[in-house]
Image: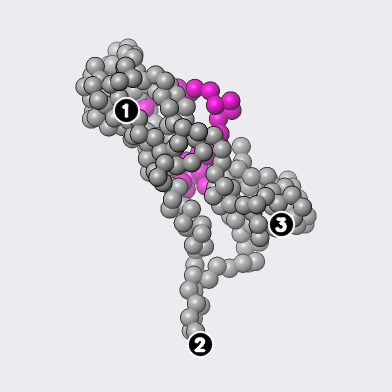
Amino acid sequence: MTYILAADLREKTMKPWAQGLVLGEEWSDAYLDLIIAQVTTRIELDLHDDFEPAIGDADETLDVDGSGTYTIYLPRRTRDLTTVKTRDSLGTLTTQAATTYRLAPSLNAAGTAMIDGSTVDILEALSLSTTCWPEGIATVQLVGKFGWTAVPDDIKWLTAKLVYDKVKPKADATIAQRTTVDAIITYGPDPEIEDIKRRYTRVPVMVG
């Protein structure tokens, strides 16, 4: 899935978050779709996140590595957990009561916005049968709802802006600094792009 459509950048069908980023019919939908797909992949890699909503928002199962401590930093944004199990050295799964752990999610329950700008999802052990999260690969199994339910407008704008800059790289150079007469004008990264990246980038976590 891509986060925007070619039509979103056309003058007649432009979306509110794409204002000022008009791309004319000289670039075909097929060409723009290709660029959009490339940019979407780049955003996911740069921000260490996947903004694609799950189809139907059904529960998913995720195996994560245990830390041998009371805290696990989860590799995906986690909105809710219905089941948490620990796996022993023989592969036997043991269901942990909901009162024995606590989830600190980065997204609201609706999956549409970050909680206080959080980019980290944490699972804390309170009174597990194993005391701490068992250390090892895929020693904890989670069942629940993960990820965004809607692509944030910030990410749609970022996608549109990067597509626009890729298609028309010389159209709008960003001036990061301008001084008075006879001074050197410095060109640099777009501050809006850098701000969105700063606010949405997650610290990468390994998956078991």
> Which-is-in-front pick, marks 1 and 3?
1
**Quadrant into which the C terminus falls:** top left
Q: Is residue 117 left or right of residue 181?
A: left
Q: Quadrant of residue 11?
A: bottom right
Magenta span has 60?
yes
The residue closer to the viewer here, 117 or 119, is 117
The type of residue carrying mark 2 is Asp
Viewer-nearest of discs 1 and 2: 1
* Badge 1 element: strand
CA neighbours of label 3 inside 10 A, class few (<14), some (14 to 19), many (20+): many
Q: Residue at x 51, y 87 (%)?
A: 181
User: What residue is drawn where x is 60% and y is 56%?
Assistant: 161
Circle 2 SS class: loop
Label disc, if present, on residue 23 of the rendered structure: 3
Above or below: residue 25 compared with residue 138: below
- Quadrant of the rendered structure where residue 124 is? top left
Is residue 191 depicted above or below 70 in this figure? below
- The residue indicated by pointer 2 is 182
